[in-house]
Image: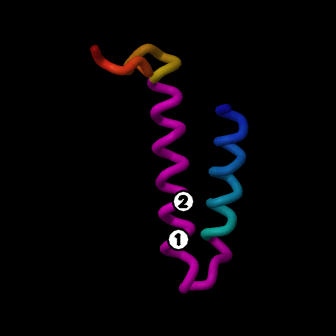
Amino acid sequence: MTNELDWTIVELKAELRNAHPDERRQIAAELELALAEREVFVAEQEGRISAEPPF
């Protein structure tokens, strides 16, 4: 999953650099979401957070 997410982040950063001003907000939002998803994934792998729902 991380490789796919990392690749998505790289692509979004490239798109953001070349984006028309009208598209920048949408791409920036997608990039922010991808970065957050990667952070959650890494935190789960490192044991800092649990993917299990609380009981």
Quadrant position of the N terminus in the picture:
top right
Residue 21 position by quadrant:
bottom right
**Which residue shows up at 28% across the image and 14% down it?**
55
**Which residue shows up at 54% across the image and 48% down it?**
34
Q: In the rendered structure, which amino acid carries the disc numbered 1?
A: Gln
Residue at image mark 1? 26
Q: Residue furthest front?
A: 55
Horizontal side of residue 8 vs 36, given as left or right: right
Q: Position of residue 43 (x, y in %)?
A: 45, 25
Which stretch did the figure color magenta?
17-43
Residue at image mark 2? 30
Q: Is residue 25 above or below residue 12?
A: below
Say what secondary structure mark 1 lies in.
helix
Q: Residue furthest left?
A: 55
Residue nearest the viewer, comparing 33 with 54: 54
Residue 18 falls inside the magenta stretch:
yes
Callout 1–callout 2 Cβ contact below 8 Å: yes
Q: In the rendered structure, which amino acid carries the disc numbered 2?
A: Glu
Q: Position of residue 29 (x, y in %)?
A: 48, 63
Give the numbered dot on residue 41: none
Q: Position of residue 47 (x, y in %)?
A: 43, 14
Query: Tag 2: Cα neighbours inside 10 Å, few (<14), some, or many (≥20)?
Result: some
Q: Look at the magenta stretch and give its main secondary structure.
A: helix
Residue 20 falls inside the magenta stretch:
yes
Say what secondary structure mark 2 lies in.
helix
